Amino acid sequence: MFVKSDFKLEVLHLENVDITESVAAKFLEDVTDSRTIKVLNLSRNNLSDASVGPICDVLDRCQSLDALYLHYNKIAGKGG
């Protein structure tokens, strides 16, 4: 577990830290349980479409999240 459930984390900037897809997935899984996180910055980490599922889970389950930064990653811009 990367984030303790009783820790009151509100802002987390992990920009340009070369986080891997597998670490990002586990980290995002832990973040979804946070009730206090408001800002999460994962920009410039070469995240790809493989991270989209865990990112969607964060958006769906983390009610406190106000801002999610993902710029300069390798997530495709496909839309419907």
Image (cartoon, grey):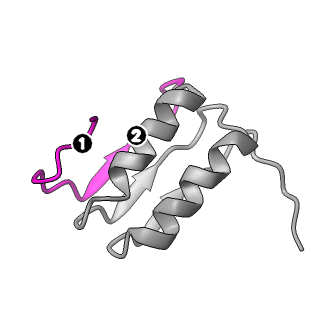
Q: Quadrant of residue 20?
A: top right
Mark 2–mark 1 distance (CA, rounded to whole Å): 8 Å
Q: Which amino acid does label 1 sit on?
A: Val
Q: Which residue is drawn at 24% across and 59% down?
A: 10
Above-or-below relation of 34 to 65: above
Q: In which quarter of the image is the N terminus?
A: top left
36 in the magenta segment? no
Secondary structure mostly taken by the magenta-highlighted segment of the chain: loop
Q: Residue at x 54, y 29 (%)?
A: 22
Is residue 73 something one can see in this rendering? no
Disc 2 element: helix
Q: Which region shows up in magenta?
A: 1-18
Picture coordinates of residue 40, whole percent (x, y): 41, 54
- Judge by depth and name the residue closer to the eye, 39 or 24: 24
Marks 1 and 2: in contact by CB < 8 Å? yes
Q: Against 25, is 38 above or below?
A: below
Q: Where is residue 27 in the image (x, y as percent from the top left)?
A: 40, 40
| Residue 38, position as x, y percentages in the image | 32, 66
Q: Which residue is drawn at 22% across and 65% down?
A: 36
Query: Any mark on residue 27, and which?
Result: 2
Residue under label 1: 3
Instruction: Give the side of residue 44 with respect to residue 9, left or right.
Output: right
